[in-house]
Amino acid sequence: MFSIAEGVRRQAALEDLARRERMRRSWTAYHGNAPKCLKHAPGQPDDNVQANYARVVVDQGVSFLFGGGVDIRVGADAPAGAQQWLDAAWLHNDRDTLLHRLAMNGAVCGHAFVKLTRAEAAEGERSSRYPRIVVLDPLTVSARWRPDDWESVVRYDIEWNGLDPVSGGAAAFRQTMMRRQDGQSGWTITDQRSDGDDARWQTVRNEEWPHAWPPVAGCQNLPAPNEFWGTSDLEPDVLDLCRAMSFVLSNAARILRLHAHPRLWGSGFHADDLSLGPDDVTILPVRDAQLHLLEMQGDLSSSLELYRRIEHALHELTRVPEISAGALNALGRVSGVALRVLYQPLMEKTRTKRMLYGTLIREVSRRMLAMGGFGEDVHIDLEWPAVAPTDPYEEAQTSVLYTQLGMSGEAALRRLGLVVRDSPDEQTRETGRADTTNGRQEERP
């Protein structure tokens, strides 16, 4: 008899399978390995053109998010030495490279995960002071959460296949992290493996994780309300547009190969009776013979117009403006206001990502400090660079005008968007803080 519980499990399995398939398709498109649009016989010319806009969309988004770096600062009430230790811990994990790989995973898959592991000794050292941050492949991660609260995760599973480093045999590996059910704080970590064709999981190790939070932390790439998994930069509609662009270009390439050069055709004679050498005079051997050129009657304007329309739709859908991909470079010097207008869609998208990835960075920093013995509740602030390209001369003039009107230097930079702080209570602090200059009060922006 079919039960409701069985139906729920089956639906969850189908959704998990569909999610992984979307991730695989996105990675395939990013690496330029998508199926070719036109068929061609072996040994025949291949007219397929792969316009890999998927990689452009992802790389541009990652560069705008983390290309300028981010400063991670502890709060004023943090224990002594916390800032120096946190800087060293991030340096130990090659922060900038790690954040780029994290954002790339999120942009392609829709969700980004990291795992914290306890400090391990490097080769030749007795011990390591800092935990390691491992960027997880979202394809290998699955999560379970409370039925009434998708933000409250109770279990993480990480599954992957590989070769045993000792025996060299094929094996499947799984690591399960489950919240303790005995009322105590902490998580239970179980490592399992399955060798060869054996479908059974063999437990290798059990470990009690003492913290209230799990070793895994993640965030959505773009918001998806009412969902645990986020939205990627390469959703199916975006990939369909990328494929349509490749199809139009491939068709145009085939048309040009077949019809770009006029073809000579004739009737009423044998081919051996006609001499077509570059220095020969072409004389038709028979009075009624005919010789013509077969030419294209039209051009590719319709195909090119369709390509431009699809490309424009792709830029609008992904919020990656053409100028960021190198287009419109003949405009000459562009003012700061014009740059903001052109980059507005990407700026808004980047600000949204900063909120999501910023929460993850603060949480990972807080957890590392807890593992380093600095307490569980150290406050973390982030400082981001300006989102959009700016005109330095114009920004400097504007900043001077602001300061001449009585605004502090920091407030002027913040008004111009050159310094952006990201903190849970930053808005509260800024709203309640005022500067007194020349006998008047001015609220900081």
Image (tube, rainbow, N blue to C red):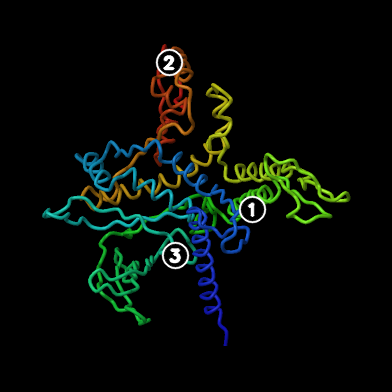
Q: Position of residue 36 (x, y in %)?
A: 58, 58
| Contact check, label 3 and label 1, Cβ < 8 Å | no
At label 1, counting other C-alpha atoms closer than 10 Å, the crowd grade (few under 14, some 14-19, many 20 or more) is many
Vertically, is 344 above or below 337?
A: below
Residue found 61% across the figure and 45% down from its top: 314
Q: Residues within 10 Å of mark 2 (few under 14, many from 20)?
A: some
Q: Which residue is mark 1?
A: 247
Residue most extreme to the bottom: 1
Sooner in the amino-acid sequence: mark 3 or mark 1? 3
Instruction: Tell me residue 47's x, y (percent).
Output: 61, 53
Instruction: Name the kind of residue labelled 3 in the image.
Output: Trp
**Image vertical order of residue 309 relative to residue 219, above or below:** above
Compare residues 317 and 265 and report the one nearer the observer. Answer: 265
Tell me the CA gap for discs 2 and 1: 55 Å
The residue beneath circle 2 is 403
Q: Amino acid at mark 1?
A: Phe
Q: Position of residue 395 (x, y in %)?
A: 46, 20
Name the residue beneath numbered marker 3: 145
What residue is rendered at 44% in x and 35% in y? 427
Q: Which of the two marks, 3 or 1, is nearer to us in this view?
A: 1
Tell me the quarter of the image containing the N terminus.
bottom right
Of callouts 2 and 1, the N-terminal one: 1
Residue 421 percent coordinates (x, y): 40, 35
Helix, strand or loop under label 3: strand
The mark closer to the camera, 2 or 1, is 1
